[in-house]
Image (cartoon, rainbow, N blue to C red):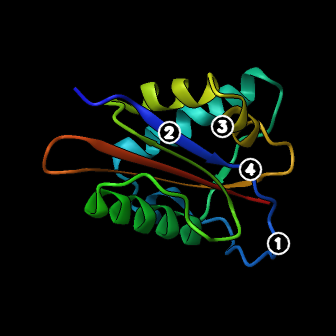
């Protein structure tokens, strides 16, 4: 069995080019992605923070990065100017979010007061290992 691994980038947004918030129905979120956002926003609500809005560009970026990690069988942060949580090995959205909440750097990203937008994605490799990606923008 593979050990769970995850990494964090607590980088600050260098440039803002986020698209406007999109209608969730129009974004065609996979249920796993929707749950990642739901559980992240539930944690934010528990801490008195506003919910994050799914952003079409961040969604595309997170999907692309999760797909790349899955195909490369590696856990590595993107160079995009976003805060990012990545993980590998968790089987559910809830488990991924809980693991991030138990890591100070990941938790700081998820509960960041300045963040307003989110992108979420998960891909499963042929061997069954799942790769997760959350990205945050101001």
Label located before the other in sequence (3 or 4): 4
For the residues labelled 3 and 4, the Cα–Cα distance comes to: 8 Å
In the picture, measured across the screen, residue 8 lies left or right of residue 12, that is left
Where disc 3 sits, the SS reads helix
For the residues labelled 4 and 1, the Cα–Cα distance comes to: 12 Å
For the residues labelled 3 and 2, the Cα–Cα distance comes to: 9 Å
Which residue is tagged 4? Answer: 10
For the residues labelled 3 and 1, the Cα–Cα distance comes to: 19 Å
Label located before the other in sequence (3 or 1): 1
Furthest residue in direction left, as rendered: 126
The local crowd at label 3, few if under 14, some if 14 to 19, many if 20 or more residues have their Cα within 10 Å, is: many
- Relative vertical location of residue 130 with respect to residue 4 in this rendering, above or below: below
Which residue is tagged 1? Answer: 14
In the picture, measured across the screen, residue 25 lies left or right of residue 9, that is left
In the picture, measured across the screen, residue 58 lies left or right of residue 72, that is right
Quick one: quadrant of the C terminus?
bottom right
Which residue is tagged 3? Answer: 106
For the residues labelled 4 and 2, the Cα–Cα distance comes to: 13 Å
- Point 69% across, 47% down: residue: 52
Which residue is tagged 2? Answer: 6
Label located before the other in sequence (3 or 2): 2
Where disc 4 sits, the SS reads loop
For the residues labelled 1 and 2, the Cα–Cα distance comes to: 23 Å
Image spot of residue 131 (x, y percent): 36, 47
Label located before the other in sequence (1 or 2): 2
The local crowd at label 1, few if under 14, some if 14 to 19, many if 20 or more residues have their Cα within 10 Å, is: few
Where disc 1 sits, the SS reads loop
Image spot of residue 49 (x, y percent): 81, 34
- Point 60% across, 35% down: residue: 40
């Amino acid at each position: 069995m593979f050990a769970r691994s995850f990494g964090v980038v607590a980088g600050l947004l260098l440039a803002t080019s986020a698209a406007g918030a999109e209608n969730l129905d129009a974004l065609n979120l996979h249920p796993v992605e929707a749950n990642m956002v739901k559980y992240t926003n539930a944690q934010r609500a528990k801490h008195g923070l506003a919910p994050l809005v799914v952003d079409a560009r961040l969604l595309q970026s997170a999907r692309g990065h999760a797909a790349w990690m899955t195909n490369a069988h590696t856990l590595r942060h993107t160079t995009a100017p976003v805060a990012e949580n990545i993980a590998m090995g968790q089987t559910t959205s809830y488990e991924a979010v809980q693991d991030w909440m138990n890591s100070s750097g990941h938790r700081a990203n998820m509960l960041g007061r300045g963040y307003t937008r989110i992108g979420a994605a998960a891909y499963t490799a042929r061997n069954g290992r799942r790769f997760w990606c959350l990205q945050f923008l101001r």
